[in-house]
Amino acid sequence: MEKTEAFIYLRARDSDAAVRFYHDAFGAEELFRLTEPSGRIGHLEFKIGSSTIMISDEFPEMDLMGPKPGERPPSVIHLHVDDADRVLAEAVKHGAELLREASDHFYGERSGLIRDPFGHEWLIGSSIEEVTPEEMQRRYTALFEDSSSQ
Protein backbone atom coordinates (compact mmCIF):
# COMPACT_ATOMS: atom_id res chain seq x y z
CA MET A 1 0.00 0.00 0.00
CA GLU A 2 1.21 3.50 -0.80
CA LYS A 3 2.22 5.76 2.04
CA THR A 4 -0.41 8.36 2.91
CA GLU A 5 -0.02 11.11 5.48
CA ALA A 6 -2.10 14.12 6.46
CA PHE A 7 -0.45 17.30 7.67
CA ILE A 8 -1.98 20.28 9.40
CA TYR A 9 -1.16 23.52 7.53
CA LEU A 10 -1.77 26.69 9.54
CA ARG A 11 -1.64 30.35 8.59
CA ALA A 12 -0.84 33.17 10.99
CA ARG A 13 -0.24 36.90 10.89
CA ASP A 14 3.20 36.18 12.40
CA SER A 15 4.20 32.55 11.94
CA ASP A 16 7.64 33.15 13.47
CA ALA A 17 6.02 34.28 16.73
CA ALA A 18 3.52 31.41 16.47
CA VAL A 19 6.28 28.81 16.28
CA ARG A 20 8.04 30.40 19.25
CA PHE A 21 4.75 30.06 21.17
CA TYR A 22 4.36 26.42 20.06
CA HIS A 23 7.94 25.76 21.22
CA ASP A 24 7.35 27.32 24.64
CA ALA A 25 3.88 25.83 25.17
CA PHE A 26 4.13 22.43 23.46
CA GLY A 27 7.86 21.74 22.99
CA ALA A 28 7.73 22.22 19.20
CA GLU A 29 10.97 22.05 17.27
CA GLU A 30 11.43 23.89 13.99
CA LEU A 31 12.57 21.76 11.05
CA PHE A 32 13.06 24.45 8.38
CA ARG A 33 11.62 27.63 6.89
CA LEU A 34 11.43 29.41 3.56
CA THR A 35 11.62 33.19 3.93
CA GLU A 36 11.05 35.86 1.28
CA PRO A 37 13.60 38.69 0.99
CA SER A 38 10.98 40.91 2.70
CA GLY A 39 11.08 38.59 5.74
CA ARG A 40 7.63 37.09 5.17
CA ILE A 41 7.58 33.35 5.85
CA GLY A 42 6.27 31.40 2.88
CA HIS A 43 6.57 28.00 4.54
CA LEU A 44 7.78 26.68 7.88
CA GLU A 45 7.70 23.12 9.19
CA PHE A 46 7.91 22.10 12.83
CA LYS A 47 7.31 19.01 14.91
CA ILE A 48 5.31 18.52 18.07
CA GLY A 49 6.16 15.03 19.22
CA SER A 50 6.03 12.84 16.11
CA SER A 51 3.62 15.13 14.21
CA THR A 52 4.80 17.50 11.50
CA ILE A 53 2.84 20.74 11.28
CA MET A 54 3.26 23.39 8.61
CA ILE A 55 2.59 27.12 8.85
CA SER A 56 3.02 30.25 6.77
CA ASP A 57 2.46 33.94 7.18
CA GLU A 58 -0.70 35.37 5.68
CA PHE A 59 -0.77 36.14 1.97
CA PRO A 60 -3.68 38.59 1.53
CA GLU A 61 -2.95 38.96 -2.18
CA MET A 62 -3.81 35.25 -2.58
CA ASP A 63 -6.61 35.30 0.03
CA LEU A 64 -4.57 33.01 2.33
CA MET A 65 -5.44 34.30 5.77
CA GLY A 66 -5.21 33.03 9.33
CA PRO A 67 -8.12 32.98 11.77
CA LYS A 68 -9.98 36.27 12.01
CA PRO A 69 -9.61 38.02 15.38
CA GLY A 70 -12.69 37.54 17.53
CA GLU A 71 -14.08 34.65 15.46
CA ARG A 72 -13.96 30.93 16.21
CA PRO A 73 -11.87 29.01 13.68
CA PRO A 74 -13.67 26.32 11.66
CA SER A 75 -11.53 23.50 13.04
CA VAL A 76 -9.66 22.43 16.17
CA ILE A 77 -6.23 20.82 16.49
CA HIS A 78 -6.29 17.86 18.89
CA LEU A 79 -2.98 17.50 20.70
CA HIS A 80 -2.72 14.23 22.61
CA VAL A 81 -0.23 14.38 25.50
CA ASP A 82 0.70 12.52 28.68
CA ASP A 83 -0.59 15.23 31.04
CA ALA A 84 -3.33 17.49 29.66
CA ASP A 85 -3.53 19.64 32.80
CA ARG A 86 0.19 20.43 32.72
CA VAL A 87 0.21 21.26 28.98
CA LEU A 88 -2.91 23.43 29.29
CA ALA A 89 -1.31 25.35 32.16
CA GLU A 90 1.90 25.79 30.18
CA ALA A 91 0.00 27.07 27.13
CA VAL A 92 -1.94 29.57 29.25
CA LYS A 93 1.29 30.68 30.95
CA HIS A 94 2.67 31.54 27.49
CA GLY A 95 -0.37 33.52 26.37
CA ALA A 96 -3.10 31.08 25.31
CA GLU A 97 -6.70 31.79 26.28
CA LEU A 98 -8.34 29.01 28.28
CA LEU A 99 -11.71 28.30 26.66
CA ARG A 100 -12.61 25.17 28.62
CA GLU A 101 -10.98 23.78 31.76
CA ALA A 102 -9.74 20.20 31.65
CA SER A 103 -12.34 17.62 32.59
CA ASP A 104 -12.90 13.88 32.24
CA HIS A 105 -15.00 12.73 29.29
CA PHE A 106 -17.08 9.66 28.46
CA TYR A 107 -14.69 8.58 25.69
CA GLY A 108 -11.81 7.95 28.10
CA GLU A 109 -9.95 11.22 27.81
CA ARG A 110 -9.27 14.19 30.03
CA SER A 111 -9.15 17.32 27.91
CA GLY A 112 -9.48 21.08 27.84
CA LEU A 113 -9.58 23.71 25.11
CA ILE A 114 -7.35 26.72 24.51
CA ARG A 115 -7.04 29.37 21.81
CA ASP A 116 -3.45 30.27 20.98
CA PRO A 117 -2.46 33.95 20.54
CA PHE A 118 -2.81 33.49 16.76
CA GLY A 119 -6.44 32.36 16.80
CA HIS A 120 -6.01 28.59 16.44
CA GLU A 121 -7.87 26.38 18.90
CA TRP A 122 -6.21 23.35 20.47
CA LEU A 123 -8.00 20.52 22.27
CA ILE A 124 -5.36 19.25 24.70
CA GLY A 125 -6.12 15.73 25.90
CA SER A 126 -4.67 12.71 27.64
CA SER A 127 -5.99 9.16 27.96
CA ILE A 128 -7.51 8.21 31.30
CA GLU A 129 -9.07 4.86 30.33
CA GLU A 130 -9.44 2.53 27.37
CA VAL A 131 -13.02 2.57 26.08
CA THR A 132 -14.33 0.27 23.34
CA PRO A 133 -16.35 1.84 20.51
CA GLU A 134 -19.44 0.01 21.79
CA GLU A 135 -19.03 1.35 25.33
CA MET A 136 -18.32 4.81 23.97
CA GLN A 137 -21.58 4.71 22.00
CA ARG A 138 -23.48 3.50 25.07
CA ARG A 139 -22.10 6.37 27.14
CA TYR A 140 -22.77 8.87 24.36
CA THR A 141 -26.39 7.74 24.05
CA ALA A 142 -26.78 7.97 27.84
CA LEU A 143 -25.78 11.64 27.70
CA PHE A 144 -28.87 12.37 25.61
CA GLU A 145 -31.11 10.28 27.84
CA ASP A 146 -29.85 12.16 30.90
CA SER A 147 -30.43 15.57 29.29
CA SER A 148 -33.95 14.70 28.07
CA SER A 149 -35.06 13.75 31.59
CA GLN A 150 -34.27 17.22 32.95
Image: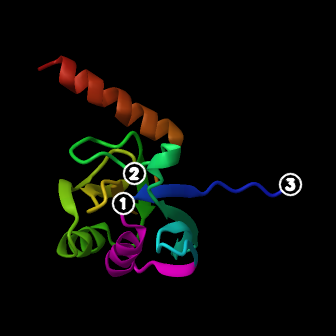
Q: Earlier in the sequence, mark 1 or mark 2?
A: 1
72 sits to left or right of 58: left
Whether pointer 1 and pointer 2 mark residues with C-beta atoms closer than 8 Å, the reply is yes
Q: Where is residue 94 in the image (x, y as percent from the top left)?
A: 22, 75
Q: In which quarter of the image is the C terminus?
A: top left
Q: Mark 2 points at which residue?
A: 66
Q: Which of marks 2 and 3 is nearer the N terminus?
A: 3
Q: Where is residue 113 in the image (x, y as percent from the top left)?
A: 27, 54
What is the three-letter code of the residue carrying label 1?
Arg
Q: Mark 1 points at which residue?
A: 13
Mark 1, other Cα within 10 Å: few <14 / some 14–19 / many ≥20: some
Instruction: Check the image and tell me how it is coloured.
Output: rainbow
Residue plotted at (70% across, 56% down): 5
Residue 85: in sight, yes or no?
A: yes
**Extent of the magenta region:** 13-32
Q: Which is more foreground, mark 3 or mark 1?
A: 1
